[in-house]
Amino acid sequence: MLNDFQRLDPKIIVPGHDDLGDISIALNLASHIETVGRQVRALRTTGTSPDKVLADLKPKIMQAYQDWDHPNLLDLEINYFAAQA
């Protein structure tokens, strides 16, 4: 869905929790969500438990996305993808 914004070619994005920006806001969010989902699914397909996925993956994602504005939501994001896998 966030990638669909690119087709609209918006000049300004008004996020819910940050400053105004350009399309990079939506694209960065989409990239983050896709990356987390892919990494969680990869671990779950090897039989890794949801708790272990969270424990192993959270520090790696936090390191990779040090400028992420909402690290408090990372547990929810990882747990969501772990439950789907």
Image: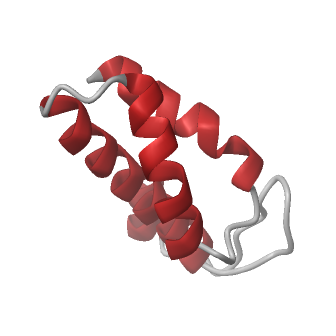
Q: Is residue 63 above or below residue 56?
A: below
Q: Measured along the vertical axis of the image, is residue 72 above or below residue 49? A: below
Closer to the camera, 49 or 23? 49
Q: Residue at x 39, y 59 (%)?
A: 3
Near-viewer residue (56 or 66):
56
Decide if residue 33 is on the left or right side of residue 84: right
Q: Is residue 25 left or right of residue 32?
A: right
Residue 25 appearing in the image:
yes
Q: In which image quadrant can residue 50 be found?
A: top left
Q: Residue at x 38, y 67 (%)?
A: 7
> Which corner quadrant of the image does residue 68 belong to?
bottom right
Where residue 44 sits in the image (x, y, percent)? 24, 31
Q: Residue at x 53, y 51 (%)?
A: 58
Left or right: 43 with respect to 1? left
Q: How many marks?
A: 0
Residue 1 in sight in this render: no
The image shows residue 9 at horizontal and vertical percentages of 49, 75
On screen, 44 above or below 37?
above
Q: Position of residue 54 (x, y in %)?
A: 49, 38
Q: Check the image and name the residue furthest to the top.
A: 83
Q: Residue at x 85, y 66 (%)?
A: 18
* Colour mode of the rendering: secondary structure
